[in-house]
Image (cartoon, helix red, strand yellow):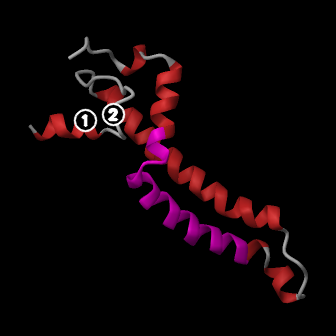
Amino acid sequence: MPESRRLDETPLKTVLSFSFRLVFSPFSLKKSLPTAGVVGTFLNTINQFPHFLHHQPLVWTKVCLNYLVPFLVSSWSIVSVRLADLRQKPSKECPDDKDEGGAAAREREAD
């Protein structure tokens, strides 16, 4: 096994790569997409209600943003919790290209 590094010592590119993979991992998508669906629908109902009421066309950029923002907030929450967990436990290795959303760390903890 290669020499362990702390997350604080990891290059930004590695942390960004890890974060991007984590956001689009099945675990994160199972959490973020339903949240975006429920919250986005609620926001669209509030923000587009006058358009529904007066039979005006929807503002599609607002519709898209109303779904995108909850997805990003939920994803950011998942990434920030995972990174904070890695920072609090200095014995853990930093994320590398083979660590799919902490799967390797969870396997080590199970042993």
Badge 2 element: loop
Image coords of residue 102 (percent x, y): 31, 38
- Whether residue 38 sits left or right of residue 18 in the image: it is right
The answer to whether residue 2 is above or below residue 89 is above
Badge 1 element: helix
Image coords of residue 38 (percent x, y): 56, 72
- In magenta segment, residue 25: yes
Callouts 2 and 1 close, C-beta under 8 Å: yes
The answer to whether residue 78 is above or below residue 43 is above
- Which residue occupies 25% across, 25% down? 92
- Which residue occupies 40% across, 33% down? 83
The quarter of the picture where residue 103 lies is: top left
Image coords of residue 78 (percent x, y): 44, 46
What amino acid type is highlighted by mark number 1? Ala
- Whether residue 44 sits left or right of residue 81 in the image: it is right
- Whether residue 51 sits left or right of residue 41 in the image: it is right
Q: Which residues are magenta?
A: 21-45
- Which residue occupies 57% across, 51% down? 73
What amino acid type is highlighted by mark number 2? Asp
- Could you tell me how far apart the alpha carbons at marks 2 and 1 are, in whole angstroms? 6 Å
Q: Residue furthest front?
A: 98
Q: Earlier in the sequence, mark 2 or mark 1?
A: 2
Q: Which mark is residue 99?
A: 2
In this figure, which residue is indicated by the disc labeled 1? 104
